[in-house]
Amino acid sequence: MVQAALSRLYDAGRIINISSGLATRPLPVVPIYSMAKAAINNLTHALAMELGPRGITVNAVAPGWTRTDMNAAVRENAEMVKAIEADTALGRFGETSDIASIVAFLASDDARWVTGQVIEASGGYKL
């Protein structure tokens, strides 16, 4: 997708990839997902170096446990929820608005000096 967009992307533009905390702390039940997200992290770094001369920043946001349809079954298990929340410094699942705020920051001019970063947005999961 990035290759297709590059000819349309203005200099000083923004690319924001969505990764996952599973890229660095994989779960055995989703190895391919974890591998793909780790590849996104590597791509983020490579593109930041390649596109830096154009002033384009490239970053990734790596959500942790966030309330989405993807983990609805997990959230139906009260014991799992309790364990996840106990392993999270902020003591709760993230909300999509928590992730959206970070993406909005990275898209803003305030983030013009941030590039090549994978920002974990997990509420401190497994610190």
Image: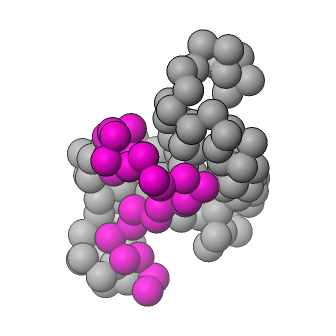
Question: In this rendering, would 21 be left or right of 93?
Answer: right
- Is 44 left, or right, of 64 in this rendering? right
Residue 73 located within the stretch drawn in magenta: no
Tell me the quarter of the picture where residue 64 sits. Answer: bottom left
Where 22 sits versus 55, above or below? below
Question: Along the line of sight, which residue is nearer the eye, 80 or 89?
Answer: 89
Say which of 124 and 83 sits in front: 124
**Is there any visible trace of residue 12 in the rendered image?**
yes
Compared to 49, does 118 lie above or below?
Answer: below
**Vertical position of residue 125 compared to residue 6: above or below:** below
- For the N terminus, give its image quadrant: top right
Does residue 40 show up? no
Residue 103 magenta-drawn? yes
Q: How is the image coloured?
A: one colour
Residue at 60% of width from left, 13% of height from top? 8
Measuring from the top left, give residue 108's x and y in whole percent: 33, 39
Expressed as whole percent of the image width and height from the top left, the position of residue 103 reads: 37, 44
The one of 68 and 16 positioned closer to us in this rendering: 16
- The outermost residue toward the top is 8
Question: Which residue is depicted at the point 38% across and 49% down?
Answer: 111
Residue at image location 64% in from the left, 62% down from the top = 23
Q: Image quadrant of residue 6? A: top right
Left/right placement of residue 6 relative to residue 119 reads right
Residue bounds of the magenta highlight: 102-127
Residue 122 lies, with reference to residue 40, above or below; the image says: below
Residue at the spot 50% in from the left edge and 30% down from the top edge = 13
Position of 67 with respect to 114 (left or right) is left
Residue 83, position as x, y percentages in the image? 36, 80
How many numbered discs?
Answer: 0
